[in-house]
Image (cartoon, rainbow, N blue to C red):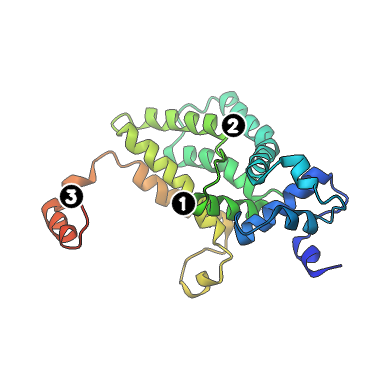
Amino acid sequence: MQESENHLMVDVKADLRERLLLVAIKLFAEKGVAAVSMRTINTEAGTKNKSAVHYHFGNKAGILKAIFEWVGKQIKPAVQYLWLQIEHQDKDEMSVQELLLVLYAPLILIQNIPQCGHDIFKLWSKLLLDSNEDTNFMDELFQSHFQSVHKRIAQQLPEKNKEHLRYQLNHSVFGFIAGSAILDSKILENIKNARIDDEQEMLFAFIDYASGGISNTQPSEGKIDILFWQEYFSKHSVLFE
């Protein structure tokens, strides 16, 4: 077996289209979308047909679209079951902390997809940072899920600025994705407490961190010396208004 095939650990008996997706996920996660050619995906997937990727997906944008559609299908039943359980148990008064766990549940499910969960997070993080691809990876399933959680938290925090809440929830999701994507990075080895060995403890530590800010209904401006910071940043050519 060639080194690249051993590294990718792709099931050669899998459906060809799915095999191409799994290879694309791993290559995109490692090298970035722009650095991976369609030919390389074909080669790493061990296909005899050199036009297989073009046939199934058309181009890289088509591959990315297919990847996140595939991801959505993997977790959809579990997400739907979660909401059925919430409604069945009449959990209308869930804490902000538990609602954040609801929000992150699809991400945790994605993270645990066999063979490629962590790579999906690495790809996701790369797309958030530097991709010019017009790809809607926040599909209808997650958008609906996000809206439902946002609505419930807004009801729990009636004094909370709704725009601030949406902003904070979005960025807590981005932080979850990016933070999870770098957990195996060697750079973290030299940063004390950059991760916690116990996965569950680490999850709840993150929820404590995110919920602390999200639960705050008092604007921070009243606790900051605005004039001091305006003067400081203006001296360094930064507008702070």
- Left or right of 241, for residue 106: right
Residue at (76% x, 40% y) in the render = 56
Dot placed on the residue nearer the N-terminal end, 1 or 2: 2
The residue pinned by badge 3 equals 223
Which label's residue is closer to the chain start, 2 or 3?
A: 2
Labelled pair 1, 2 in contact (Cβ < 8 Å) = no
Residue receiving disc 1? 175
Closer to viewer: mark 2 or mark 3:
2
At label 2, the amino acid type is Leu
Which of marks 3 and 1 precedes in the sequence?
1
Which x, y percent locates residue 32? Answer: 60, 57
Q: Residues within 10 Å of mark 2 (few under 14, many from 20)?
A: some
Measured as percent of width and height from the top left, residue 159 is found at: 28, 31
Camera-nearest residue between 227 and 221: 227
- Give the distance between the C-alpha atoms of the residues marked 1 and 3, in whole angstroms: 25 Å
Q: Amino acid at mark 1?
A: Gly
Disc 1 element: helix
Kindly state the secondary structure of the residue where label 2 is placed. helix
Q: Gap between marks 1 and 2, in whole Å?
A: 20 Å
As displayed, is residue 213 above or below residue 199? above
Foreground residue among 90 and 231 = 231
